[in-house]
Image (cartoon, rainbow, N blue to C red):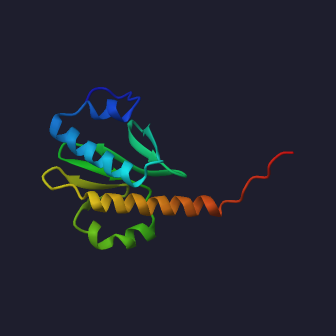
Amino acid sequence: MAKTDFKSVDEYQDTFGSEKKERLAAIRNAIRETAPDAEEVISYQIPAYKHFGFLIYYSAATNHISLSYPYSEALLAEFKTELSGYKMSKSALQLPDKDPLPLDLIKRIVAYRMKENELAAASKPQKAKKK
């Protein structure tokens, strides 16, 4: 993947071969189904989705696809059992190319992140409107 100035998710995904591109598209569709109003952006040169802040990122690597999202202790506790079968770093969950994508898990993580972001936004003090 030589190009590194992506302007859209399509442009990012088009740089990969058909099998990886299909997996990326499946993740994109799962996110869009769960968060249809989320803004699709490129951030750090990878696909990202925003809904009251960043929800989730994803990116392709040689042998896996990484899902990155702002971890919270609550999220990790909620999905502890399901996440235990995957390799995780401080910032990403690795989905091996040899395994089927856990699309239901991805949808539930996105829904959970949406609720976290909505609650965080609702708890922020509202700025006074100028008269």
Question: Looking at this view, is 46 or 39 the one in front?
Answer: 39
Residue drawn 26% across the image and 54% down it = 94
Above or below — where is 121 with respect to 19? below
Where's residue 21, x and y in %? 22, 38
Residue drawn 44% across the image and 69% down it = 73
Question: Looking at this view, is 101 or 72 the one in front?
Answer: 101
For the view shown, which residue lies furthest in the right direction? Answer: 131
Residue drawn 33% across the image and 33% down it = 10
Where's residue 54, x and y in %? 48, 50
Where's residue 97, x and y in %? 16, 49
Q: In which quarter of the image is the N terminus?
A: top left
For the view shown, which residue lies furthest in the left direction? Answer: 98
**Would you say 12 lies left or right of 44 here?**
left
| Quarter occupied by residue 77 | bottom left
Q: How many marks?
A: 0
| Quarter occupied by residue 24 | top left
Where's residue 29, x and y in %? 32, 47
Above or below — where is 68 with respect to 8? below
Q: Quadrant of the C terminus?
A: top right
Residue drawn 47% across the image and 47% down it = 38
**Would you say 37 lies left or right of 130 here?**
left
Above or below — where is 36 with respect to 85? above
| Quarter occupied by residue 14 | top left
